[in-house]
Amino acid sequence: MHVVFYRNLNLGHAGSPNREQLEGALKAGGAAQVKSFQTNGTVLFKAEDPEGVVAAAAGELVAAAGYADAAIVRPLADLEDLLALGVFEKHESPRTYRETVTFFQGGKKPSWSMPWTNSKDDVDVLHIGDGIALSLIRKPRNSAGSPTFELERATGGVATTRTRGSIDRLLKAAATWK
């Protein structure tokens, strides 16, 4: 089973497909099964060639809704393994607003020493693996820190972020999906 994380996709909003269009595009691209999760562009799917399915679906999404942003594909097992490392549990802090998981691709790998804190002191990147970063964000004033921004700036690639709670719910949904 795989997950595709679409960047800047919000189901039904202007420039984004609705659930039927999103799932239909992936099915038309060759996915055996598809289940959109929440409304943030996170989709569980089963396919022999997951990258090929997402690439084939891209044209359908442009035609259906004008959506043409990045899509990052990960095996579901990668997420399970990453959360099993216990990184968040080792860095608990009352200052934390959210625990996040950021998926990134393209560009170079960040050269930060871990853990790394940005200059605004609102993002702590705790762990970087193969295209995935675990971070804590703070919300000192009206806006929260952005690991997406920090990773895109450091890599020159694209990134998209989900909360740990979303990833936990995704894993629970996947466990019950046949």
Image (cartoon, rainbow, N blue to C red):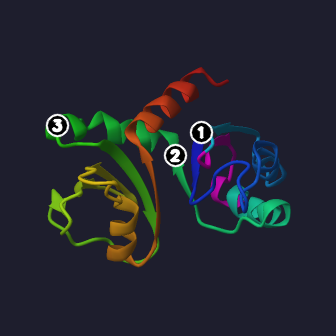
Location of mark 2 (residue): 75
- Taking the image as shown, residue 20 lies to the left or right of residue 165, namely right
Range of magenta residues: 40-52
Residue drawn at x 52%, y 51% is 74
Inter-mark Cα distance, 2 to 1: 6 Å
| Amino acid at dot 2 | Pro
- Taking the image as shown, residue 49 lies to the left or right of residue 97, namely right
Binning the other alpha carbons within 10 Å of mark 2 as few (below 14), some (14 to 19) or many (20 upward) gives: some
Binning the other alpha carbons within 10 Å of mark 1 as few (below 14), some (14 to 19) or many (20 upward) gives: some
- Helix, strand or loop at label 1? It is loop
Inter-mark Cα distance, 1 to 3: 31 Å
Where in the figure is residue 9, as x and y percent of width and height? 63, 56
Q: Is residue 41 magenta?
A: yes
Where in the figure is residue 36, as x and y percent of width and height? 67, 39
Location of mark 3 (residue): 92
Closest to the camera, between mark 1 and mark 3, is 3
Inter-mark Cα distance, 3 to 2: 27 Å
Closest to the camera, between mark 3 and mark 2, is 3
| Amino acid at dot 1 | Met
- Helix, strand or loop at label 3? It is loop
Residue drawn at x 75%, y 49% is 22
Q: Is residue 162 magenta?
A: no
The label number, if any, that marks residue 1 in the structure image: 1
Residue drawn at x 42%, y 41% is 79
